[in-house]
Amino acid sequence: MSDDWRWLRESETEVWEGRPRLTTIAGSVVVGLAILAAAGWLAATVDARLAAVGLLGVPLPLAASLQIQRTTYLVTTRAIWVKTGVLGRSVRRITLSNVQNTAYEQSIRGSIFGYGTVTVEVAGGDDIYFRRISDPGSVQEAINDRTDRGDDRELPGSPEQWQAVLATVKEIRALTDQSTARHE
């Protein structure tokens, strides 16, 4: 499979890459098997030509499997990517500066078998979902580690420089107050 859909900038590296788990197609397999069984029963009890209906059950799990194989989630040091598409291709790239929040959820089965969905809330756009991925907690943590905008970042400048800025702002305010008082 070609990686021509991704382009990384200088100093940008991959942090995590994944795709939905294969168990995602379990529903499609069950429906496909049910169609095959129903077609077999209809062929045996009604008309043998109805066995052809069973052919409708074959493409369901195949299409679902192909969709999983053609879906890729990528986290880099600068962005989050989602590539989807079976016949066509859709690629979405969101810079980490546009990430507002992240969350992950796991169903009971997901908790038992170690998969879930990571939700990335995007500023000014649709949210991104990494659906049915392995170990969603660590993926969320990898994103949060790169988007953390907490108070632990150092402010630019020294305390003396900030004192000078404060003094200048106070002077500007005093001049503005004097000007306003004269015009009243």
Image: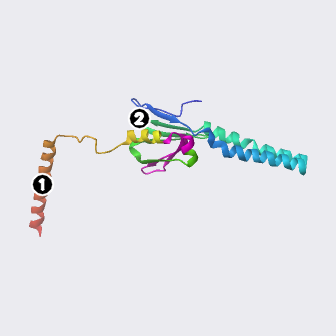
Residue position for label 2: 77
Residue located 90% across and 50% down the image: 45
| Identity, as a three-letter code, of the amino acid under mark 2 | Thr
Residue located 71% across and 45% down the image: 30
Q: How many marks?
A: 2
Relative side of 52 to 126, left or right: right
Which stretch did the figure color magenta?
A: 111-136
Q: Position of residue 53 (x, y in %)?
A: 82, 47
The front one of 80 and 101 is 101
Q: Is residue 83 visible?
A: yes
Q: For the residue carrying disc 2, how many other residues have a C-alpha within 10 Å: few (<14), some (14-19), or many (20+)?
A: many
Q: Position of residue 25 (x, y in %)?
A: 65, 42
Relative side of 115 to 157, left or right: right
Residue 113 on the magenta span? yes
Quarter of the image where the C terminus is located: bottom left
Residue located 31% across and 45% down the image: 150
- Mark 1: secondary structure: helix
Name the residue furthest bottom: 184
| Identity, as a three-letter code, of the amino acid under mark 1 | Lys
Relative side of 64 to 148, left or right: right
Relative side of 32 to 74, left or right: right
Residue 147: name its quadrant: top left
The front one of 127 and 184 is 127
Residue 3: name its quadrant: top right
User: Circles 1 and 2: CB distance less than 8 Å?
Assistant: no
Quarter of the image where the N terminus is located: top right
Residue position for label 1: 170
In primary-sequence order, the first of circles 1 and 2 is 2
